[in-house]
């Protein structure tokens, strides 16, 4: 018999797990469980993890709706990210935190082990057990709209254009950036452009590689074999040693600035001049890009604007209760030309 049927028959329904049950399972006080469920900061990380695990095991969900009715808002945004050591992730997270602070909100961050559907979905469930008004997902790269399971009625915004039509999305115009880098090098007179790409499982890496290939094909130029790095300067250096041995390479578009820096060091050690022998373009415009030697030509992303747009779309849903699933904000990029690019040698 269902709970509804039991109520109609005058029978008692089985109560769900209580806050006290969670406290007993986690071996903490009820007050500690309450602090965790409210997202309070003064709880040790290991204690918080133990309480959240107990909540998941027991199927306990704090009465978020009742608290929201009393307070109107928790003043907290949940955020899921992956690999914070990467420039794009770390700068986007920083931008979201700054934009949230300007709106009077704090941010609770979960850094997932992998961007798989299971890991992102589990992190979203854990965050929904805490006192959050909405959720920002920074690049759920291996998750898809069909496989990502999120708590119902939780306002969400994603920094990933694949989720347009499912959730509001914000992203930089990666395609325009990749095309601008290639067209700049071809415009200087290079016959073709080689590409040092990011990891195969990265959506930004895929989009930048597609833009590189499309720009070469549109110009009727040969498309060289793609080189695959992992976003790190070390991978750029290792692949740069290969590039340095090929005298036919005169221009390289790197999928990020760190790999470009490693590539430039390898070229320098091999006695190949940048930009005299090889022109190099990066992507992101990190602070150090202007201080490399030579200063790096790169595609600049406006991370601050990305963060503001993510928070704006999320809070519009929170405050207005509207669905913005079809909204996709594309933030423009710009090519910053410095001294690492020049016409090819005669």
Image (cartoon, rainbow, N blue to C red):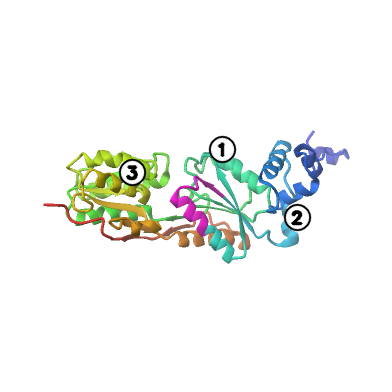
| Labelled disc at residue 236 | 3
- The residue shown at (70%, 62%) is 72
User: Is 68 inside the magenta-drawn segment?
Assistant: no
Most distant residue in the left direction: 346
Position of 137 relative to 302 (above/below): above
Left or right: 50 in relation to 212: right
Mark 3 surroundings within 10 Å by alpha-carbon count, few (fewer than 14), some (14 through 19), many (20 or more): many
Residue at disc 3, secondary structure: helix
Identify which residue, 198 or 331, lies in the foreground. Answer: 198
* Other residues around mark 1 within 10 Å, as few (<14) / some (14–19) / many (≥20): some
Confirm whether residue 225 shows in the render. no
Foreground mark, 1 or 3, reads: 3
Between 269 and 211, the one lying in front of the other is: 269
Say whether residue 111 is left or right of residue 17: left
Which residue is the site of mark 2?
66
Q: Name the residue beneath numbered marker 1.
A: 118
Residue 84 coordinates in the image, percent (x, y):
50, 48
Find the magenta span and give its range. 80-95
Q: CA distance from mark 3 to mark 2?
A: 53 Å
For label 2, the crowd category at 10 Å Cα-Cα, with few meaning under 14, some 14 to 19 and many 20 or more, is few
- In the rendered image, which quarter is residue 45 located in? top right
Q: Position of residue 282 (x, y in %)?
A: 32, 52
| x 49%, y 51%: residue | 165
Pick whichever, 88 or 163, lies toward us: 88
Q: Earlier in the sequence, mark 1 or mark 3?
A: 1
């Amino acid at each position: 018999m269902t709970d509804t049927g039991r109520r109609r028959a005058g029978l008692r329904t089985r109560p769900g797990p209580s806050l006290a049950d969670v406290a007993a399972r986690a071996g903490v006080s009820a007050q500690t469980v309450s602090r965790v469920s409210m997202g309070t900061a003064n709880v040790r990380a290991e204690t918080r993890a133990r309480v959240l695990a107990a909540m998941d095991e027991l199927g306990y969900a704090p009465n978020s709706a009742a608290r929201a009715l009393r307070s109107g808002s928790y003043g907290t945004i949940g955020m899921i990210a992956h690999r914070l050591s990467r420039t794009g992730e770390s700068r986007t997270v920083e931008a979201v935190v700054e934009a949230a602070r300007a709106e009077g909100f704090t941010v609770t961050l979960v850094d997932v082990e992998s961007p798989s559907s299971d890991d992102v979905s589990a992190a979203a469930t854990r965050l929904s057990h805490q006192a959050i008004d909405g959720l920002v997902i920074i690049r759920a790269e291996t998750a898809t709209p069909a496989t990502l399971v999120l708590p119902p009625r939780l306002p969400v915004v994603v920094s990933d254009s694949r989720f347009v039509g499912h959730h509001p999305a914000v992203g930089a115009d990666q395609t325009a950036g990749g095309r601008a880098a290639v067209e700049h090098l071809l415009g200087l007179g290079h016959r073709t452009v080689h590409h040092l790409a990011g990891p195969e499982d990265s959506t930004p890496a895929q989009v930048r590689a597609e833009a590189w290939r499309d720009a070469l094909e549109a110009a009727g130029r040969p498309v060289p074999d793609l080189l695959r790095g992992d976003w790190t300067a070390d991978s750029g250096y290792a692949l740069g040693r290969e590039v340095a041995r090929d005298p036919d390479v005169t221009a390289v578009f790197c999928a990020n600035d760190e790999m470009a820096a490693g590539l430039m060091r390898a070229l320098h050690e091999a006695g190949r001049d940048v930009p005299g022998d090889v022109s190099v373009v990066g992507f992101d415009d990190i602070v150090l890009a202007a201080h490399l030697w030579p200063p790096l030509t790169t595609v600049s992303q406006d991370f601050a604007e990305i963060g503001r747009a993510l928070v704006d779309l999320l809070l519009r849903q929170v405050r207005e209760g509207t669905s913005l699933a079809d909204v996709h904000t594309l933030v423009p990029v710009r090519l910053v030309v410095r001294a690492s690019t020049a016409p090819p040698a005669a």
